[in-house]
Image: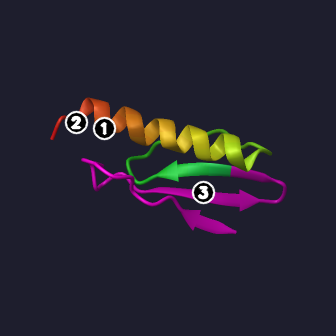
Amino acid sequence: MHSELPAGPGTCMPEHRVAISERGSFCYATCSCGWYSPARRSRDLTRREADDHLAAGEAVDPG
């Protein structure tokens, strides 16, 4: 299974595209900037980590 998180309102960095992928019973998030999360069994935790990454990227780029 593969899904992309939609860009939230006010996203300033269009180059940050986060995708959630699954491999067996684990899932992980990857971003177009090179960031990736550790493999997790919890999809919710993986999504929260991806959201945190996007929020941190917005804080860095006042754009």
Disc marking residue 20:
3
Q: Which residue is label 2 attached to?
A: 61
Q: Secondary structure at mark 3?
A: strand
Viewer-nearest residue: 36 or 13: 13
Amino acid type at mark 1: Glu
> What separation in Å lies between label 2 and label 1 (alpha carbons)?
5 Å
The residue shown at (53%, 51%) is 30
Coloring basis for residues: rainbow
The residue shown at (58%, 49%) is 29
Viewer-nearest residue: 37 or 13: 13
Asked if the magenta segment contains residue 8, the reply would be yes
Image quadrant where one finds the N terminus: bottom right
- Please state the extent of the stretch shown in magenta in the rendering: 1-27
Left or right of residue 56: residue 23? right
Amino acid type at mark 2: Asp
Q: Which residue is label 1 attached to?
A: 58
> What separation in Å lies between label 3 and label 2 (alpha carbons)?
23 Å
Q: Mark 2 and mark 1 in contact? Answer it, CB < 8 Å.
A: yes
